[in-house]
Image (cartoon, coloured by chain):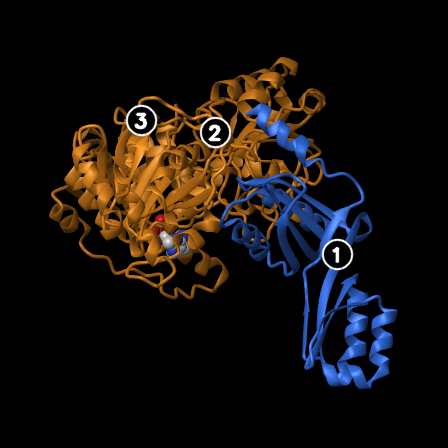
Amino acid sequence: MEVKTASFEKTASPKATTVSGAEAVIKCLLEEGVDTLYGYPGGAIMPVYDELYKYQKQIHHVLTRHEQGATHAAQGYARVSGKVGVAMATSGPGATNLVTGIADAQIDSTPMVCITGQVGSHLLGSDAFQETDIIGISTPITKWNYQITKAEEIPEILAKAFFIARSGRPGPVLIDITKDAQFASLEFNYKKCSGIRSYKPTPEINLIEVERAAEAINNAKKPMIVFGQGVILGGAEELFKQVVEKSGVPAAWTILGLSAMPTDHPLNVGMVGMHGNYGPNVLTNECDVLIAIGMRFDDRVTGNLEKYAKQAKVIHFEIDPAEINKNVYADIPVLGNVNETLKVLLELLKPNKHEAWHQKFKDHYKIEFDKIIKNDLNAERGKIGMAEVIDEINKCSKGDAVIVSDVGQHQMVACRYSKFNQTRSNVTSGGLGTMGFALPAAIGAKMGAPERDVVAVIGDGGYQMTIQELGTIFQTKVPVKIVVLNNDFLGMVRQWQQLFFEKRYASTEMINPDFITIAKGYHIKAKQVSKREGLKEAVTEMMQSKEAYFLEVKVEQEENVFPMVPTGASVSDIRLE
Amino acid sequence: MEKKNFTVSVYTENNIGLLSRIAAIFQKRHINIESITASRSEVNEVMRFTIVVQVTEEQVKKVAGQIEKQIEVIKAFYHTDDEMIYQETALYKINSADFVEDLNIQDFIKESNARIVTVTPKFFVIEKTGKRHETDSLYEKLKPYGLMQFVRSGTIAVTKNEMPISNILEQFDTTN
Ligand SMILES: Cc1ncc(C[n+]2csc(CCOP(=O)(O)OP(=O)(O)O)c2C)c(N)n1
């Protein structure tokens, strides 16, 4: 089969060396600056593992306990470091176990390259041992995928894989390599990919659109910004802050936009969406100009589209043309990398303060504070509340930790209450909502930013979905902190059952094992706290630990997360109780 | 918005696996593909998919956007029927005995500008190229005689307006 990559037609390096396909794979990874990779061996990828043995000093292979763990770890690594995460697995079951992490990376635009072994090319399509059509399976959940059947294709295809994964709107790429291609030899020379005919990672900026956007913002009386992960992916945090400060526009974040701007910034008005803050949700339906920056109007953000920001002129800063008008019509679409478009915008903005309008957010915050936040943080109930735990973590970390959250009530609470000073500090599964994400993702996050504290906040349900990764923590000695907020329920589902299914708690109660014994079985320091008096001390001890640490907090069993926009409701009908 | 026939023309690199990527985009949105063809295009080594769907304009616009997102897709256009010149080809296999004995059949063939492709002592193969209603109408006429086989191709179409693929390709080459 032919592979056309314009930039490669000129490749001809004089110092080519003959290597096996398997060794070529490792050399490509090194050329791309990969220092850590997550994976699990098996028959069809063994030649590559055999070569890894030789390259142990240059490349750290982390043996996760399940291939799903490898993808989430690679995601965590990518999300905090901004580099491409790499996961590797064998054919068949190894490859299919990657699927959840790939889908998660696709919907959350995380740069990742997955390498899978495949049965020998003469066996393809014969239902051979451990053969699955991973190309077919991964097609709808990858940015690109490709099956290599000839060793000579390896350098070019891997270069392309990394380029595609990290450029434009990032995403996961899967490369499947048949075993014979790993064994065969090739003349190795490497050239990084810098462009592919037919692929335009970043659309060209249309200056007229930026001018129109600036004019609309300058003339707005009640403008509001909603920012998403695009700000982080574009490396535009500083520029974005300047835009916010110069224009004086209140800025609210989506769950993946969180930490792009310091939480305590005076113009940061909180989170939008289903469990977002009261003010930004209600005022979405009051603003005159809605400036969406690097976000994609997910239905968890918009609620009922028929009633979403209908009064507002919508400006959409976006790198992916297919996102424009996909869910919400954009009166002014501004295509491009926000790092470039915001630069132009900043020049055109007039300084403004919007004090009266900003006061509205503060008024709404006051209502939310009195009804919800105050109680969440200073509960007088019997058991510890989830928000209190996050609050203690904030106090110890002073806003400098990376918080990796799983999926459920604790996730919403972690995102609502965590404080962040730095970008790339909030790692969570947004678009896919993957339970089991946090424990392995925290491993990758800590490896991607070893100098930072990494705290995983997980529910008792999600924890058990990938609990085996405690083994990876034990073996690699990666000093992550794990907090399980144990309510003995699949809390988020139970909340829905309470509110919308007349308290029929079908299969949401969990009889849990002794988590402390399990952690200790993996030789991880562990402690349980169930009384408020012990919380501060326990969290402090965990945060000060130099090694991995497991803290189980027995929390209120039937706590609910509010505010809440019920599915199908309008964001302005957000419920406070 | 009302559903109409749209022809989506997708220009792509010639790579394995693209068909399933493109088909998956329709499948994910629960859009039934009426017909699909893939062939070489006017540009060397560039493939062209011609896909007919019945959707609203809003849907087709979004689908085209998602198709263009695929790495090896150069450009996806969509057009309504009146912006296109389109044709389908059908083959009809008929028992030779019927053909010789019944003069009506011979008239149909003449009237409908069909063409005899093959004649054997046992059967005749007739070919008709045209719009859907034309190939359908010949089908209806031949059916009472016991069609032995019938097959029809997907729509192929060219647009009345230009599709400047070479220019687009040049842009890709210079901007990257
Ligand atoms: C893999 C997966 N399966 C099912 C769900 C549906 N789901 C969403 S939240 C939730 C409950 C999570 O419970 P737990 O981990 O204990 O956290 P809590 O909500 O109690 O904080 C479930 C089952 C999911 N998001 N992911």
> x, y (%) of residue A395?
31, 28
In this view, A328 is above or below A133: above
Report in which chain the residue with disc 1 lies.
B
> x, y (%) of residue B150?
68, 73
Mark 2 lies on a secondary structure that is loop
Residue located 44% across and 24% down the image = A262
The crowding category of the residue bearing disc 1, from other C-alpha atoms within 10 Å (few below 14, some 14 to 19, many at least 20), is some
Shown in blue, the chain is B
- Hey, which quadrant is residue B14 in on the image? top right
> x, y (%) of residue A575?
54, 47
Q: CA distance from mark 3 to mark 1?
A: 54 Å
Q: Colour of chain A?
A: orange
Please give the residue where the numbered disc 3 appears in the rendered image: A16
> x, y (%) of residue A400?
33, 25
State whether label 3 is within 8 Å of ligand 1.
Answer: no
In this view, the residue in front, A523 or A450, is A450
Please, what is the three-letter code of the amino acid marked with disc 2? Glu
Q: Which mark is residue B5?
A: 1
Q: Which mark is residue A278?
A: none
The crowding category of the residue bearing disc 3, from other C-alpha atoms within 10 Å (few below 14, some 14 to 19, many at least 20), is few
Please give the residue where the numbered disc 2 appears in the rendered image: A9
Tell whether label 2 touches label 1 (CB within 8 Å). no
In this view, the residue in front, B28 or A34, is A34
